[in-house]
Amino acid sequence: MSFAKLVACCLLLLSTALLNAAPAVLKDGHPDTYVVKKGDTLWDIAALFLRDPWRWPDIWQANPQIENPHLIYPGDVLELAFIDGRPVLRRQGNGVIRLSPQVRRSPLGQAIPSIPLDVIAPFLSRPHVLEPGDAEKAPYVLAVADEHLLGSAGVRFYVRDLQGDGQRFDIVRPGKAYRDADSGEILGYSADFIGTASKLRDGDPATFRMLASQIEMLRGDRLLPATDTALSAFYPKAPERPVSGSIIDVYNGVAEIGQYQIVTLDRGRADGLAPGDVLQVYHKGDRVIDPVRGHGRERVQLPDEIAGTLMVFRVFDRLSFGLIMRATRSLHVLDRVRSPE
């Protein structure tokens, strides 16, 4: 690496560190008090007070010894105050709640969540992504009992290549390839969720019973160990190192992407992403004709424009899922994502 590139990389890392350390900036026209309502999220509440609502946890790293954040509940009255020049939210009659929760995750109970967890819950408990080569190594459905061609809830079926001692499995069907938007390299495959099943008997083939299904199972579908992921609060932050990538897919395949839609990114754990990381979405600038230079034959690339904000909530090695938290215009597949400015 050249000295110039090394310096540029160091500056990017420094700017990211400074971004995470900088205090949150209050929004013009913010209220002085707010009564928490059922259905609120911490992001919604922060958006009333902060210019950048994702900035509320900007100092949580300074309190790693705190096991639980200060939770808020419907009916709580929050009032704005300042301590040592920094904005805080004070729960009337019950101490101070900093604009930054003090750990990344905590049990929710009845507390106000940070983002709408009901939207992302299925994506936390199901595989949805197969790494390259995973499908070929996974056990597969050989046949369905009693001469059934298709499998649905309650039927018995037989599985080959089963390994391990697990009892409960997710049944998935390998789908489309996810490709890097720049290189075209295959990063993984979608794993369409079929249903859940339990093992009745070991063997080759092993015997299973379908517990529940969303669509009918077919021969050749793959089995993955089931995972039970408890819902947690996700607290946003800037990535620890600069990230630049693209939206490569949107759940349900809509043409225009808006708030609270789930997108797939071509960057993941290997690129430094973690749950809670916030990225800005950029709409690619158009190429326009310069009416003055080149007699109308010169085209100029306009700069990309910030068009939204997303938060990463699940990360794989080279892919991740994000939830669109804000969109100022329609977003599209292949729009760029970058660490916040």
Image (cartoon, rainbow, N blue to C red):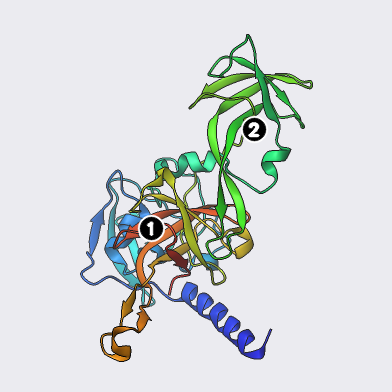
Using the image, determine if residue 23 lies above or below residue 296.
above
Residue at screen point 48% across, 75% down: 21
Residue at screen point 56% across, 69% down: 240
Query: x and y percent of residue 281 in the render?
Result: 40, 65
Q: In which quarter of the image is the C terminus?
A: bottom left
Horizontally, is 274 left or right of 222 in the view?
left
Residue 172 visible in the snapshot: yes
Q: Residue furthest right?
A: 203
Query: x and y percent of residue 9 in the render?
Result: 59, 81
Query: x and y percent of residue 211 in the render?
Result: 56, 20
State the residue position of label 1: 332
> In which image quadrant can residue 176 be found?
top right
Q: In which quarter of the image is the N terminus?
A: bottom right
Using the image, determine if residue 33 lies above or below residue 305.
above
Question: Between disc 2 and disc 1, whose residue precedes?
Answer: 2
Q: Which residue lies furthest to the top in this view?
A: 146
Horizontally, is 90 left or right of 16 in the view?
left
State how far apart marks 2 and 1 are (Cα). 31 Å
Q: What residue type is labelled 1?
A: His
Q: What residue type is labelled 2?
A: Arg
Q: Which mark is residue 222?
A: 2
Residue at screen point 41% across, 74% down: 23
Horizontally, is 257 left or right of 67 in the view?
left
Residue 87 visible in the snapshot: no
Residue at screen point 31% across, 77% down: 288
Q: Which mark is residue 69?
A: none
